[in-house]
Amino acid sequence: MTFHVAAGAASDSQPSGLFLIAWGLMASGFGFAMLTNFRGFTDNFVSRLEARSRSSARHIRSVVTLVAAVFAIAGPITAVAGVVAAGRGQIVVHSPAPLRAPLSYLVIAISGVIVGWNWFSPRSLYRSAARSGGWRLAIAVLASLGGLTFGVCLAIGQFTIGLIALLAVGVPSLLLLTDDKRRTPKR
């Protein structure tokens, strides 16, 4: 009986306008950049997947194109739904209660591990940005701080601020992926 009551309550809740707008913009950016191969975005993404997979580049490219098409179609629709929800007053999510101590520490640790992996993995996005230096390093640091902020905000129950931090992670990471060209050193 408790299960049915909880399931009914969960189905009545609507996502916030801010979440839908953020998700829609990120999905649109990813989908359109992938479909149009903006500044070699698809080539870089496929080469990274091919290095970590046993599949052929042609198979990976066809799957990536299919997924990108779904994101390119669903993204703008979701963003418009978010604007409509925001117009109805559903701008932010009512933040859940802060997580209990062991679970909150686990969420923060997982976000730290994900950010750390992006810095210390040999072929990671942030490590190559750090080697390049300059604005790429600044974007990698900004994206890392956004990821850590997202984890902390989830742990303390500030979901809306976490969503803003998630958007701050997504946009810089897309910029790093579009600019990730394999450069030969100048002599």
Image (tube, grey):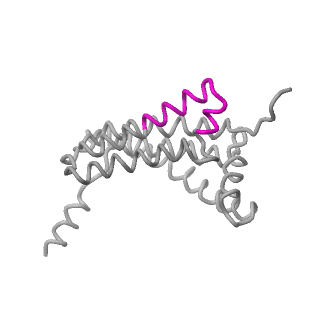
Q: Is residue 126 left or right of residue 7?
A: right
Numbered circles on residues, count: 0
Residue located farthest toward the top when viewing the structure as drawn: 134
Within the magenta stretch, is there residue 158? no
Percent across and percent down for residue 42 are 69, 48
Residue that protrudes farthest toward the bottom in the picture: 1
Is residue 141 within the magenta segment?
A: yes
Residue 58 on image: x %, y %:
76, 62
Q: Measured along the vertical axis of the image, is residue 112 above or below residue 12?
A: above
Please state which of residues 95 and 132 is positioned toward the viewer in this rendering: 132
Question: Does 131 sit left or right of 104 as displayed?
Answer: right
Residue farthest along the right direction in this orientation: 187
Residue at 43% x, 34% y: name it: 145
Depth check, front residue: 156 or 124: 124
- Name the residue at 37% across, 41% down: 150
Q: Splitting the image into 4 quarters, where does residue 158 fall? A: top left
Assign the magenta stretch its main secondary structure.
helix
Residue for point 80% across, 31% down: 185
Which quadrant holds the C terminus? top right
Residue 43 percent location from the top left of the image: 73, 48
The magenta span reads: 127-146
The quadrant of the picture occupied by the N terminus is bottom left
For the point 72% across and 65% down, the residue is: 59
User: Residue 2, how many percent across, how many down?
Assistant: 14, 71
Q: Is residue 173 left or right of residue 50?
A: left
